[in-house]
Amino acid sequence: MLHIHNLRAGIEGKEILKGINLDVKPGEVHAIMGPNGSGKSTLASVLSGREEYQVTEGEVTFMGKNLLEMEPEDRAREGIFLAFQYPVEIPGVSTVNFMKTAINQIRTYRGEEPLDAVAFLKLMKEKMKLVEIDQSLLNRALNEGFSGGEKKRNEIFQMAMLEPRLSILDETDSGLDIDALRIVANGVNKLRNPSNATIVVTHYQRLLNYIVPDYVHVLFNGRIVKSGDKELALELEKKGYDWIKNEPATA
Amino acid sequence: MAKDNQILEEITSREYEHGWTANLEADSAPKGLNEDIVRFISRKKQEPDWLLEWRLKAYRAWLTMKEPRWPNVTYPAIDYQDIIYYSAPKQKAAPGSLEEVDPELLKTFEKLGISLTEQKRLTGIAVDAVLDSVSVATTFKEKLGELGIIFCSFSEAVKEHPELVKKYLGSVVPMQDNYFAALNSAVFSDGSFCYIPKGVRCPMELSTYFRINAAKTGQFERTLIVADEDSYVSYLEGCTAPMRDEHQLHAAVVEIYAMKSAHVKYSTVQNWYPGSKEGVGGIYNFVTKRGLCAGDHSKISWTQVETGSAITWKYPSCVLKGDYSSGEFYSVAVTNNHQQADTGTKMIHIGKNTRSRIVSKGISAGLSQNSYRGQVHVLKRAINARNFSQCDSLLMGDRCGAHTFPYIDVENSTARVEHEATTSKIGEDQIFYCRQRGIDEEAAVALIVNGYAKEVLNQLPMEFAVEAQKLLALTLEGSVG
Amino acid sequence: MTIATANRNLISELESVLPAGSKSEPAVSKAWEQFIQTGLPGQKSEEYKYAPIARQLEKLPALKPSAGDVLLPTPLPQFLSGQTCNYIVFVDGRFSSAKLADKEVKVTTRTTEESHDAKDPFEWLNAAFSPSLTIITVEEGVALQHPIAIVYHSSGRGTLVNPRWTLQLLKGSKATVIEMCQPHAYELFQNKKSVIEAGEKASLEYLILQDGTPAQTEVNHTEVRCALSSYASCFTISLNSRFVRNNMKLVVDGSQVEAHLYGLYLPSGDSLIDNHTVVDHRQPESFSNEMYKGVMNDRSKGVFNGKIYVRPHAQKTNAFQSNRNILLSENATVNTKPQLEIWADDVKCSHGCTTGQLDEEALFYLRSRGIDKRSAYAMLLHAFVAETFKEMKMTQWKETIDGLVTSRLLKV
């Protein structure tokens, strides 16, 4: 599904990703871990198409198409969803209206008929139930005045609505207490199926207790220095990141 | 950057949707302005002597006045002798009913999406349609008449209800109020008149639709709304004009007189031709709008969505004379390309316990200049006056300007006046967030701008709100800087 | 007498007292011509709409600029007693003497040069009446040990005085500056023009203390120019005088500038205090913050006009302004006009402005804790005004001002 080969990228002339290789297949959950500044969020940003990042080398294909040439909205329409570390507040725009616009633009892109109001509401009700989010939250302006937990829950709700092929959760656990974390993780788990994939970007292992990964990659200094299964995350938790810093890059 | 330029290029090449001209025969005055022209107009309208005298007095006052100039608004001097002050579409005789109206005229308004045929009462809005200088048709007249509501063209009101017109004409905007009001008082040709009797709640939206059609013509209409005690009316105004290379002058006057406990809501969606992307042509929209809350507990609300005109110069105001009276002003002004908008309000607190609220949202793109200019004046005897003002500006692109000039004059120590203003641009992060969800940049901008303007759009009646939202999106399409 | 004829008479009267021979100086004669062209601001003048300044000139018994250089024994203002400062003393608007504590401060004079960006008629008037300009320089890279004190004295011989000076803080220097009048009872119209140039990485703390008498009228043109990476913090504290007009202009002429403008005005009696400020962002990526507060009592009048300009390429500017007013008496008035003029899109600018009374809820809260109404009132008023000098780093001055302000508020 996603194929990253020798990806080098940076911001303002400073190289942050120094040759990333990663393959994600349908049905898989990959965790990307690493200390602060290792390039985790940069990877999420480059995949979703933030314009301030420049890719200097390498290639990324998604469903066989060159991802790096696509506009951010086209990546979303192809099925990439980024759950933001800091979801943006947009005053005056309700989540409902926002989602309706997004869904219908995506449907148009895919050559499908836009949803009418009734069908949209039905879909929304269904997904709201799935991710346990309250209607009152969705009637308010997008993320405005939301608590950290409410914002993250809204991200998961949007993920449920858009049914992406690949979800990238960027530090979704940051700023969440344990209850909020569980609700968010539950939502993610419910949305898992054999045809979609998830990349979980996180600093701590605790989220991985709830979203169990098939693969764990350790990112350090712009490279994936170690890959393994979920045991690797536990080992990291025990030994800390210093342990990994001496590992050579896995090609 | 290249992409932004390309998008900018796309919008600037957009065509003005209402830019066609209708092929109507017109009956016009010769170009230029002098006492004879004033007499000519008055004669054409078969006006009584007192009105002619009133016009002449205004004309003489105008001669002694100087055209106002504001910072951040620039335009070449207007040649007042190069304007046709009266143009009426030729009709056989004054139409007694809609069946007698020139079908070409009806077609003109159909094309604008305004149905004058009462059979199509889909919208439930009574319309007075003004083309160039004259009112051509008023709908739902009889139905309103049953409630005692008078809704007709100004000329008709002069003939049918002279006592009302004589009493209230100029009572809110005196003829010598300002340069353009004086000009209007001298040469106004038609407009709408509306009277809501005591205790009546007008059951439908009343609406005037203005269109300038003839070339070289100025439009000088006058609207007078009188709301008697305990009455309510919601009034809408819409405007369009053809695309022409020359600038055309629109200098209207709107007067609202609200008696005890009356409530008048006046909404405008202004979409005059803004000129070409190079700044050629377009309407000079110099308008005086003022409401007088004469009675206690009366209320006047102005809502405006300003997207058109080359230059807009307009300050719908409220004189809060009655105790416990209140005034509101909600405005969205969008400028693009070479447009200039200088708009705002005046809230004059005279009575006790008066309230006012101002919400102004300016959006500038392209090479445009967008200014809020307003005044909150609390007079000495206005005990317990309250005002809250919020003026926000949004800039799109680095070649436009956004300016705020609020005057706050407080002469009473019990007043509470608050004013807040912010200037910002659409956040890159907001646009990216939308795009990540699959919404393209243009739609993202429209979404964010509509959210930004929501507090004002919410004040509009439903049908207008939808039109206004579309206009916002159209005016700004692609102007991400 | 109409304003128009009053102006004409004043102007010819002014011309008759121009310093002898000064018209042969090209800069002076140019300034005088400009002044005549602009004329004195009348009622229709937008800039002096609320401050009928020509009338203040008319009130003077006679227009007398200083007769010449006057040397006076100069007692130090009480405000500065016991403090070692770099004193620069003006008498009747002319530079009189300098008593410098730091060797890195230099004072020179030179002929007034043509000023190009002056717009205000009183700036032209100042130039016409000030053939010489006093220049104070602080050496590069020096953090001055002692404050610079600019003190205006009056001999009683001049009624129209026009001090004019420039302070240059060279690259990397740091200085604290105070400017004030030695109180006196003479009928006086002071029309000052000063420029402070904060060079690259220079740092300035600047206090203008206005505590005059009901006989005094002041018009001050104060310009602070900030170069790259400089810091400026300016306090204008106006406690007294019959009529004060401050034209404070902050020019942000470099990036990475941090500038603060604070103002407090407490007019009482029949006095008028008018603060016109301009913050002009000409370069990108700088920060300015402005806070002016006023408490108007008796029949007094407060005026605030704050302009923020952000020029077309001054992107990433952050500019904030707030103006808050309290009217204490039913005959007091305030006219305020915060004004934003923005030509760059990537900026964050805001202004807020309020006019009202003290918070009733807070008043009640204090009283419910046993504080009498009068004290509670004074406490809240004090809290309201103290915010304007809270950030002053010269603690000694800050405490003195606090005392002055508190005693003023207790009279309320």
Image (cartoon, coloured by chain):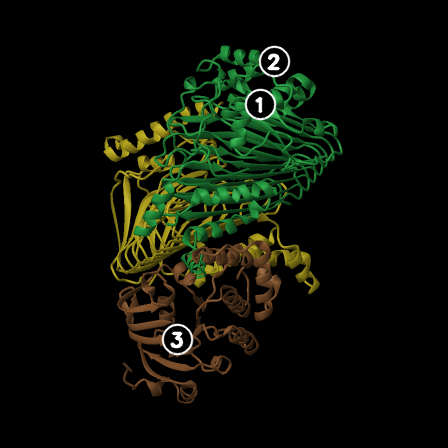
User: Where's residue C47, x and y in %?
Assistant: 44, 36
- Rendered green, the chain in question is B
The CA span between labels 2 and 1 is: 18 Å
The secondary structure type at the circle numbered 1 is strand
Residue A173 lies, with reference to residue C17, above or below; the image says: below
Label 1 chain ID: B
- Rendered brown, the chain in question is A
Q: In the shown orientation, is residue A92 left or right of residue C201?
A: right
Q: Nearer the viewer, residue B239 or B333?
A: B239
User: Residue tagged by mark 2?
Assistant: B47
User: Where's residue C221, x and y in %?
Assistant: 38, 43
Give the mark toward the camera: 3 or 1. 3
User: Residue tagged by mark 1?
Assistant: B136
The CA span between labels 3 and 2 is: 84 Å
Give the mark toward the camera: 3 or 2. 3
The secondary structure type at the circle numbered 3 is loop
Give the mark toward the camera: 2 or 1. 1
User: Residue tagged by mark 3?
Assistant: A25
Label 3 chain ID: A
Residue type at tag 2: Glu
Residue A22 lies, with reference to residue C253, above or below; the image says: below
Q: Are marks 3 and 2 in contact (CB under 8 Å)?
A: no
Quarter of the image where one finds residue C14: top left
Looking at the image, tell me whether mark 2 or mark 1 is earlier in sequence order. Answer: 2
Residue at 24 percent across and 59 percent down: it is C140
Residue type at tag 3: Lys
